[in-house]
Amino acid sequence: MKSKYKIETLLERLDHLHRSYLRDFAYAEGLNLRQLEALLYLSNCNKYSDTPLAMSEYLGLTKGTVSQTIIALEHKTLLRKKKDSDDRRVIHLELTTKGQQIVKNCVDNSDRAKALRSNAKLRTLETGLTELLREIQHVNGHRTFGACHTCKHFRRKALGEHHQCGLTQEPLFEIESLKICREHTEYATL
Ligand code: SF4
């Protein structure tokens, strides 16, 4: 019980510190926190998840708020909309070079990223936090939005040089295997 309480306090403190950093960073760039979080999400998600709907699910925002956020970011030339080549009703969102630069500065300069770079126990930390996150997502019925290479549909090097998504049958480049995905599915646990 003591450990449980300690971990909850640590998570709360880490979350508070990181959000405070993000808020300050966003303010210095002339953005609000939601706009910055939208840019960070788009830099991290794959081609099946760069839509307004996936963004609203991931960030827990209403469609209206996401729509306003996208308009503001477009206006600031930090992202652009792109129609899907197969289904013209589907809109994809992509960061402009300016948007990518803001994300890079934000990620590289965060205290959390700096501390993690020097943490020798990254693997253990990753496993523990992933398990905790999955349990919370499972209880609440949320999508996992996990990294592609950990998905049960992921087929490593199934196309020779490239990986493959077992759900869409499309090839996946190495960089895509590290991105998060709306369709990510956990392996069933016994
Ligand atoms: S393998 Fe899974 S995570 Fe990767 S693109 Fe396909 S559905 Fe998404």
Image: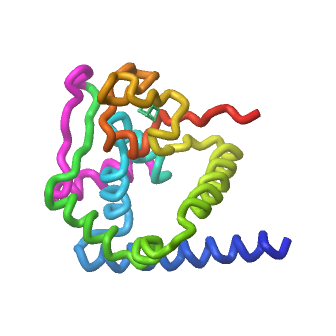
**154 above or below 42?**
above
Residue 93 visible (yes or no): yes
User: Which part of the image, by quadrant, shows the C terminus?
Assistant: top right
Tell whether position 182 is magenta. no
Residue pictured at 43% horizontal, 47% vertical = 56
- Quarter of the picture for ligand 1? top left
Q: Position of residue 79 (x, y in %)?
A: 20, 52
Looking at the image, residue 114 sits to the left or right of residue 68; the answer is: right
Say if the magenta span includes residue 86.
yes
Q: Identify the residue shown where x is 45% and y is 27%.
A: 155
The percent coordinates of residue 5 (x first, y second) are 77, 74
The residue nearer to you, when weighing 76 against 131, is 131
Image spot of residue 32 (x, y percent): 33, 69
Q: How was the colour assigned to the protein in this rendering?
A: rainbow
Q: Quadrant of residue 63?
A: top left
Please give the count of numbered marks on the rendered protein.
0
User: At x 26% / y 38%, what residue is drawn?
Assistant: 92
Residue 73 in the image: x percent, y percent? 23, 57
In this rendering, is residue 104 above or below 16?
A: above
Q: From what the image shows, is residue 170 above or below residue 63?
A: above
Q: Is residue 19 in sight in this rendering?
A: no
Image quarter for residue 118? bottom left
Q: Which residues are magenta?
A: 61-88
Q: Residue furthest right?
A: 1
Name the quadrant containing residue 27.
bottom left
Quadrant, the N terminus: bottom right
Q: Residue at x 20, y 31 (%)?
A: 83
22 or 66: nearer the viewer: 22
The residue lying toward the viewer, choosing from 89 and 48, is 48
